[in-house]
Image (cartoon, rainbow, N blue to C red):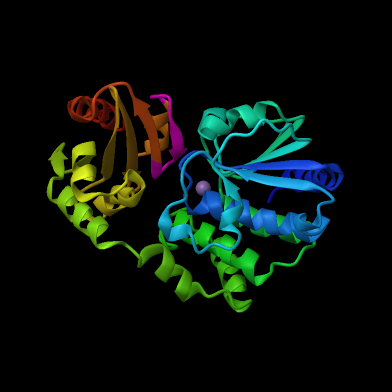
């Protein structure tokens, strides 16, 4: 963590210390890093200020969107609230969100807050808070919270460790993405040394697909479209298919990553049909092409190897649009 951010982290500690009403907000449709970071810092703040159950201050955790089943094992997961509240907070701390729109419906909670701060690692981050703690070289927001705990001089308990390990594990694709650094592995090793059950966590996160999810994924994979001489692989997640198998979008999100496992494929693309002429595009790159740049030019954002954006068209129309847009982008990148 750079010196300026260490100063911010110390200032944030003071803000938290003085706040009576605190809100923690993650990004819409939460992933492992978002949930792990939220609950990790939730634990740290309680260590600093005392248990919230003791009622001498308030702390609420908000996320727009449901928690995927495979993260239900996280300690204190029941503290996450999906419903917007009218409460006014002294301090709102945002985690893992690169811009204000990523807060979804929780934007209204954020906007009512007196002081706002954000901890994030997205290179496409657009500052929207009073205080921005940004570290684009970190693998995950969870890794930032791990370092923040050290700066604050707090204990990483077993439960906090489970949250932070999960955040790092998932945002690095099980420690294989290029965002994984020596520091990431040292942090993971330290957590392992503390007795964090890393094998059980992996089992919960990656080994608990329901049968119908497995079947829906297999079907969708069998419908993969290859374009640009096999450089690009596209899966369209239509609502019909989800209904047919009785699964949710969040259940099959991981398909975007799996496209990268195909030889020759440089960019994997998952198109999610959101209904009423709207689609969400998730992109994964093997490394040659920066999909964050491409996504940012289309109003989205993310990381060089994992990014996304929304399109106002049907999922079917997205296919030719994506092929053409990516062809232009790839030619421009040469
Ligand atoms: Mn993240």
Query: Foreground residue, 193 or 334?
Result: 193
269 displayed left or right of 167:
left
Instruction: Tell me which corner region of the image, top left, top right, bottom left or bottom right, holds residue 43.
Output: bottom right
Q: Position of residue 243 (x, y in %)?
A: 22, 43
Q: Residue at x 37, y 64 (%)?
A: 206
Query: Viewer-proximal residue, 230 or 308?
Result: 308
Say left or right for 113 vs 208. Answer: right
* Figure quadrant of residue 274: top left
Residue at 47% x, 54% y: name it.
Answer: 171
Q: How many marks?
A: 0
Q: Is residue 19 rendered to the left or right of residue 41?
A: right
Determine whether 29 is above or below 181 in the image: above
Q: Position of residue 100 (x, y in %)?
A: 57, 29
On the image, which quarter does residue 150 sit in? bottom right
What is the span of residues highlighted in magenta in the rendered image? 297-306
Q: Quadrant of the image for the C terminus?
A: top left
Location of residue 58 in the rendering, given as x and y in whole percent from the top left corner: 76, 46
Judge by depth and name the residue closer to the eye, 81 or 333.
81
Residue 207 vertical placement versus 22 (above, below) = below
Residue 301 lies in the magenta-colored region: yes
Residue 164 falls within the magenta-colored stretch: no
Report the predominant secondary structure element of the magenta stretch: loop
State whether residue 139 appears in this view.
no
Q: Is residue 253 visible?
A: yes
Residue drawn at (27%, 40%), measured in percent from left and top?
Answer: 269
């Amino acid at each position: 963590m750079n010196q300026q951010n260490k100063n911010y982290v110390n200032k944030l500690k003071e803000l938290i210390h003085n706040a009576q009403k605190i809100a923690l907000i993650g990004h819409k449709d939460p992933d492992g890093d978002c949930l792990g970071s939220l609950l990790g810092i939730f634990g740290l703040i309680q260590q600093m200020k005392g248990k919230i159950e003791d009622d001498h201050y308030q702390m609420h955790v908000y996320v727009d969107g449901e928690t995927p089943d495979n993260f239900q094992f996280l300690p204190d997961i029941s503290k996450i609230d999906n419903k917007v509240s009218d409460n006014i907070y002294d301090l709102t701390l945002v985690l893992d969100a690169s811009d204000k729109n990523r807060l979804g419906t929780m934007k209204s909670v954020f906007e009512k807050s007196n002081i706002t701060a954000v901890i994030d690692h997205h290179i496409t981050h657009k500052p929207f808070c009073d205080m921005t703690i940004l570290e684009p070289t970190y693998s995950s927001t969870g890794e930032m919270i791990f370092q923040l705990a050290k700066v604050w001089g707090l204990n990483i308990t077993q439960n906090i460790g489970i949250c932070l390990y999960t955040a790092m594990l998932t945002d690095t694709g099980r420690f294989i993405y290029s965002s994984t650094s020596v520091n990431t592995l040292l942090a993971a090793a330290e957590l392992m040394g503390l007795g964090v059950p890393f094998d059980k966590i992996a089992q919960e996160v990656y080994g608990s697909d329901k049968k119908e999810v497995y079947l829906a994924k297999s079907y969708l994979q069998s419908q993969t479209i290859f374009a640009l001489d096999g450089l690009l692989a596209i899966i369209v997640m239509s609502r019909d298919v989800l209904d047919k198998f009785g699964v949710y979008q969040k259940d099959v999100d991981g398909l975007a990553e799996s496209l990268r496992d195909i030889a020759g494929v440089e960019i994997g693309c998952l198109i999610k049909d959101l209904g009423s002429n709207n689609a969400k595009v998730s992109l994964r790159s093997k490394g040659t092409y920066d999909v964050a740049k491409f996504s940012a030019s289309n109003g989205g954002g993310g990381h060089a190897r994992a990014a996304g954006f929304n399109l106002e068209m049907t999922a079917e129309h997205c296919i030719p649009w994506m092929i053409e847009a990516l062809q232009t982008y790839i030619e421009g990148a040469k």
